[in-house]
Image (cartoon, rainbow, N blue to C red):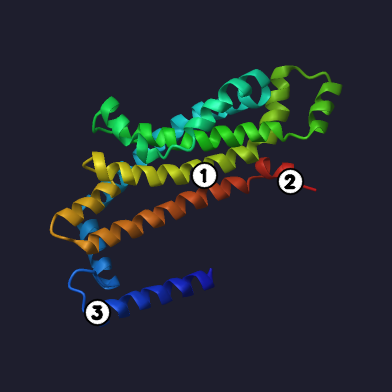
Amino acid sequence: MLPSLTVIAVLIAVWWLVVDLTRSAIFPTPWQVVMGTVELIRDGTLWEHIGASLMRVATGFGLAVLFAVPLGLWMGWVKGAFSTLNPIFQILRPISPIAWIPIAILWFGVGNASPIFLIFISSVFPMVVQTTAGVHTIERRYLRAAENFGVSRYTLFRRVIIPAVLPQIIVGMRIGLGVAWLVVVAAEMIALHSGLGYLIIDSRNAGNRYDLVISGMVIIGLIGLSLDGTMRLLEGLKIVRWRYVR
């Protein structure tokens, strides 16, 4: 932790020094960014933008989890489903979520439905791929042991398949959530009137408030770090780590 804080402090010092030496009339110093953030907090707009972005991410990402995990389990377990659906996912997966923005606006307009759709599209593919791969990599000894005990298919999935795949599911969720946070910011810059992405583009257009632009960028980074840290906590749960115990 200390090395990271030291590097951050050095970068802030260099940033402040460069702005002072160049006497930039536009680019803000770190202190100006802090004061801009305080301004947003005092007028209440910061919490509105953060809440709007988090709401969209939570909705789109939640829908993606509900869709991707069962589908990934099915594709991993049923060979016919994998051979039929995997080529389709491999065609759609490389398409940038940003490329879906015109389609999202055409289908859903400029309300909340568009970014939620974009978040769903961007986060569903990593989770499907990771879940499917997790089923394919289950050690056969677990399945043979279950067969020896004569367990039902339902019990096999509940007690063997899902616990064994859970680490891969968490990895897919972590990747998907990171992509979702990127996408919602980009979508808000283009198609909405609230959220952190809108805050950045509006601050740029309304009087070149680059202190607020940088403030929005820093807040986006800090929230992204917090979201990733939350997913890392899930990786540390006993129910997830049991598979790797030696």
Q: Residue furthest left?
A: 207
- Which residue position holds label 3? 22
Disc 3 residue type (three-letter):
Thr
- Which residue position holds label 1? 175
Write the residue at 31% across / 80% down. Answer: 17
Q: In the image, which is nearer the foreground, mark 3 or mark 1?
A: 3
- Can you give x and y, in whole percent of width and height, for residue 130 in the image? 60, 37
Write the residue at 25% across / 32% down. Answer: 111
- Sequence-wise, the earlier of marks 2 and 1 is 1
Disc 2 residue type (three-letter):
Tyr
Helix, strand or loop status at disc 2: helix
- Which residue position holds label 2? 244
Disc 1 residue type (three-letter):
Ile
Helix, strand or loop status at disc 1: helix
- Sequence-wise, the earlier of marks 3 and 2 is 3
> Alpha-carbon distance for marks 3 and 1?
39 Å
> Alpha-carbon distance for marks 2 and 1?
20 Å
Give the total of numbered labels: 3
